[in-house]
Image (tube, grey):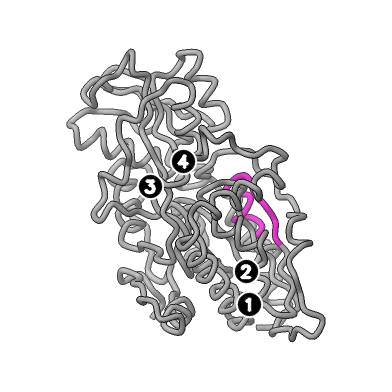
Amino acid sequence: MPATTRTTLRRSLVAAAALPLLIGALASCGYGSDAKKDASADKAPIAADAKKLSAPEVRIGYFPNLTHATALIGVKDGHIQKELGGTVLKPQTFNAGPSEIEALNGGSLDIGFIGPSPSINAYVKSKGKNLRIISGSASGGVKLVVNPDKIKTLDDLKGKRIATPQKGNTQDVALLNWISEKGWQVDPESGKGDVSVVRTDNKVTPDAFKSGSIDGAWVPEPTASKLVSQGGSVLLDETALWPDKKFVITNVIVSQTFLAEHPDVVEAVLRGTVKTNAWIGANPDKAKDAANAALEKLSGKALDAKIIDPAWPSIAITNDPLASTLKTQSEWAVKAKLIDQPDLAGIYDLKLLNKVLKAEGQTEVSDAGLGVK
């Protein structure tokens, strides 16, 4: 593709990303929106004689959040850089999905770790032209935490105020679907009904819970464990609602332009993530410490043991994108009348991931019929 055409395409995608979001401004962790250079990449070893791949560098984005542990550890400990050889890994951290998608659309980011809802939204908004999901990264890590003095059973939620990170985000949709299956009514736009769904940024949810302005929250880690540390009680782990107790919370996405021009680089990154995930699985305690060390470097403060110790085991690190669960999540959003029926055909391209998995002696994964033809 000529450079002028690529520039025009990227500009048009930026414009598309600026349109009102179908699902809302989304982010699993729900913090701010600024991108930052990740200084921890400076320590990633590059051998003097290492051979560059087809691109001199690859720009990878992720959140400073436990559900992005593959990136936290893979970048900080050099697992991904090792597979890239002389191609330089240049990471950026983001605090919200829209800003990461904007960077991908604008050509300043090549690969990103991000949640399912912003992946769906961006793909639909660009009419299937901006990204592909190329791997999974994490499952689970979402809990309903309540004030045990006010709520003792699930039926007690009726008439209570329950927070979610944002209207239409992954947790919001899950709660609305759960409420619907209970036979209760809630207006998805206002959040008013048999349960008051209060859209609250995760960074202020602990204060709202402590003050009593909310009675509970359906939230991802580590926010859930922060609420527990304040006296909250876990009433429901969302994994209990899913077949095989698995559902996608973090994907790996890539710019379609970068994938087409540098498949060798994308494959190398995937080798790095697969090997990082294998190390995490074999060394859960060391991995927890490594993820916390990366968070401390990025944010200036590590998570307290009373927060990270219960949060860490509730997140399952996985290469499988759990594509069927993304499809289900989109159906829930349609059912809640938050979005129109999306066309997700082609959102996945798992060929390189399955190539890597096969080479590593691991089981190949499915795109649930939503892969490129």
Task: Check disc 4 and give the amino acid type.
Answer: Ala
Measured in 3D between alpha carbons, the distance from the residue under mark 3 to the one under mark 1, in whole angstroms, is: 40 Å
Q: Tell me, for residue 83, which label it has, or none.
A: 1
Q: Nearer the viewer, residue 195 or 42?
A: 42
Q: Tell me, for residue 79, which label it has, or none.
A: 2
Q: Secondary structure at mark 1?
A: helix
Measured in 3D between alpha carbons, the distance from the residue under mark 3 to the one under mark 2, in whole angstroms, is: 39 Å
Q: Secondary structure at mark 2?
A: helix
Mark 4 closeness class: few <14, some 14–19, many ≥20 residues within 10 Å: many
Q: Does label 2 or label 4 sit earlier along the sequence?
A: 2
Circle 3 is placed at which residue position? 339
Q: Which residues are magenta?
A: 91-103
Q: Nearer the viewer, residue 203 or 307?
A: 307
Q: Does label 3 or label 2 sit earlier along the sequence?
A: 2
Mark 2 closeness class: few <14, some 14–19, many ≥20 residues within 10 Å: many
Q: Does label 1 or label 4 sit earlier along the sequence?
A: 1
Mark 3 closeness class: few <14, some 14–19, many ≥20 residues within 10 Å: some
Contact? badges 3 and 2 (CB < 8 Å): no
Q: Nearer the viewer, residue 73 or 142?
A: 73
